[in-house]
Amino acid sequence: MAMLHIVNKSPFERNAFKSCLDHAVAGDSILMIEDAAVGAVDGTVFSSDLKAAMADKSVYVLGGDLAARGMSEDRIIDGIKVVDYAGFVDLTAENDKTQSWV
Amino acid sequence: MAMLHIVNKSPFERNAFKSCLDHAVAGDSILMIEDAAVGAVDGTVFSSDLKAAMADKSVYVLGGDLAARGMSEDRIIDGIKVVDYAGFVDLTAENDKTQSWV
Amino acid sequence: MKYTVMVNEGPYQHQSSDSALQFVRAALEKGHEIFRVFFYHDGVNNGTRLAVPPKDDRLLQQEWSDLAKEHDLDLVICIAAAQRRGLMDPDEAKRQGLDADNIIEGFRISGLGQLIEGSIQSDRTIVFGD
Amino acid sequence: MKYTVMVNEGPYQHQSSDSALQFVRAALEKGHEIFRVFFYHDGVNNGTRLAVPPKDDRLLQQEWSDLAKEHDLDLVICIAAAQRRGLMDPDEAKRQGLDADNIIEGFRISGLGQLIEGSIQSDRTIVFGD
Amino acid sequence: MATKKFMYVNRKAPYGTVYALESLEVVLIAAAFEQDVSLAFIDDGVYQIAKGQNTDGIGMKNFSATYNALGDYEINKLYVEKESLEERGLTEDDLMPIVWEDEDDDWAEKPSIRIVSRAEMADILADQDVHYSF
Amino acid sequence: MATKKFMYVNRKAPYGTVYALESLEVVLIAAAFEQDVSLAFIDDGVYQIAKGQNTDGIGMKNFSATYNALGDYEINKLYVEKESLEERGLTEDDLMPIVWEDEDDDWAEKPSIRIVSRAEMADILADQDVHYSF
């Protein structure tokens, strides 16, 4: 019964991403889309929170949203997987359900 | 050249209120409207930040927005003044300019 | 897999409509079924035909309309949200005594039950919002 | 004191339109002048006449329209933002070859220069947004 | 039709945005579908069920009484996160006393609000089929 | 007409919302009014001028090149907050090299971007007449 959490808010602007991390359970997956993509970058004030969550959760970022904001893939946290929209669809199919942290 | 800062975001949801506090200068005034009104309540994780700002800034809350969210005036931080829309207008006239932290 | 997609913001102001459109396209390409797209809150504003094609940008309302035609999609606008915001089809405009309507081809206006039913019938419900 | 007020969100979704309306009323009551109210971003959606009066709630679009009539207010909708979102007056609709328009009485559509000019002419510019 | 577990996730304060009101409108319609309905109040969502809401000063409709009607529609699982309350200086006493009448227990009035910890909330969210986010 | 100091306060990431794009559209119109125009990039607003933006994957218009045109309109005061960059793991090297040509200095190319501290930004904001918030 794994869940895909979809986050679309910058972790620097809103508490939605933090709230997602606080409520996701072991084995869940987290996908960053839209403004949330900037949360994938390493060396930010948010990256330690995200790394801690990665201990027992899988984390993905939508490549198109990362590139749109000028962040190249080589600066994201090790272990975060970059997906395109086809990969986004696959994640929704592979997990039993999804929750959007709008 | 004093400025009125208008904040309309909950300090628990977004960084706008914190950013306002970080950028207001001594002698400025801060008015909480809409969802920001909940920031006036004492005993929250945000109240110490706001109290620190009150050392050299005046802080106001729109009473209608506070009441709409079920928060009575007797639980707000000492020193915060409650105004109505007429008081809101007065604040914009008394200060030389305004900035909205949307 | 069968999907119901919920779009809660209008075009342009937030990326939600863009993201939902890209998601629906990708799902269709993979052979999944889009049972319904339900437009709620400001999402109802995606269904207007009165937007003007920009010189150099996408016209989201038209893209939804075209996609609906191409794939026979069921694009449903919530009637209660639409009434607040001024999105009308000919029948509803007439019923309300209004002198115009603004819905674009490919969308229809209906009740919130369509959302619940969509989620019951579908394997997945995906929400795009602010 | 002379004010220009900027409204950046549509009706209902965010409180901005309500707050701006209450502010403008209070300013007028105190004898201040509202030089202009400029509607930008989704704020353009405040100017539709196709919204339906709810049974038990305010109809914001009508309240703006009524206030404009009562106080001869200048309510300006940004044309670029309006074109993206589908808010049209009869002239613009005709020019674009559209079969309908949806602007409500009391609003007019014009360019962004009206905002800048408003801020230059006014003592205060107040922004209401998300 | 199959029965699914529907969760309404409410994370925003009322009135500043329309989400709280329009979330409630979905919940009321959902009642007719005989599904398993729960509501979660997390983060600023807890203000939606704060007691004493008075909108006279802002010209908006006060819809808070509607939460009291949910029991009549057999919607009686309102999960409220303890940590969200605490961070905002609130306790259960600040919430409306929302109740429902238990048909199977001689129509006894029972509380609909269940205060849960963040960890419990995570498990409750994980146990649902459909998540509507407002 | 009197000359006023106009400040465009940009605090949000591009593409996730329309504010960055429509802010820029106001700035371009403002150029015709011969006012004193400044732009501030604070919080997530710093991503608006990040270099290498590529929107191919999301189907939206890439408008970042427009910032390079601002110099032609004599808009050359783009204040970027140092702390906002640092919190996001960014440095000045991550920003587009936006420049303007100084007519009074033999059209020498000069940087439009000025990195300032949070305290300096507060003073700059305090020194304006009109604040547009995006």
Image (tube, coloured by chain):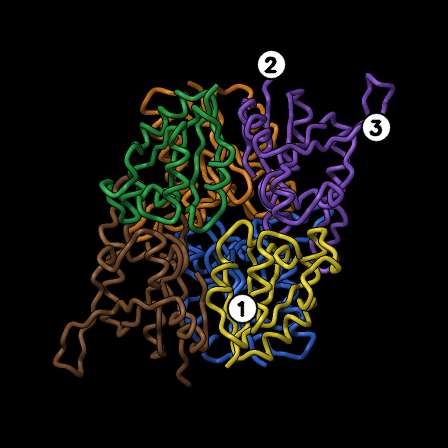
Chain colours: A green, B yellow, C orange, D blue, E purple, F brown
User: Callout 2, which amino acid?
Assistant: Met
What is the number of the mark on residue B5? 1
Q: Secondary structure at mark 1?
A: strand
Relative to E127, residue E21 above or below: below
Residue at the (58%, 34%) spot, across then down: E118
Chain under disc 3? E
* Residue D10 percent across, percent down from the top left: 54, 54
Q: Is residue C130 left or right of residue F95?
A: right
* Residue C101 percent across, percent down from the top left: 54, 45
Q: Between marks 1 and 3, how big is the CA–CA gap?
A: 47 Å
Tag 1 and tag 3, C-beta contact below 8 Å = no
Q: Is residue D107 left or right of residue F87?
A: right
Within-10-Å neighbours for mark 1: few <14, some 14–19, many 20+: many
**Quadrant (top left, top right, bottom left, bottom right) of the C terminus of chain F:** bottom left
Looking at the image, how many numbered discs can be counted on the residues? 3
User: Callout 3, which amino acid?
Assistant: Glu
Discs 1 and 3 lie in a common subunit: no
Residue at the (26%, 74%) spot, across then down: F74
Tag 3 and tag 2, C-beta contact below 8 Å = no
Q: Secondary structure at mark 3?
A: strand
Q: Which residue is mark 2?
A: E1
What is the number of the mark on residue E109? 3
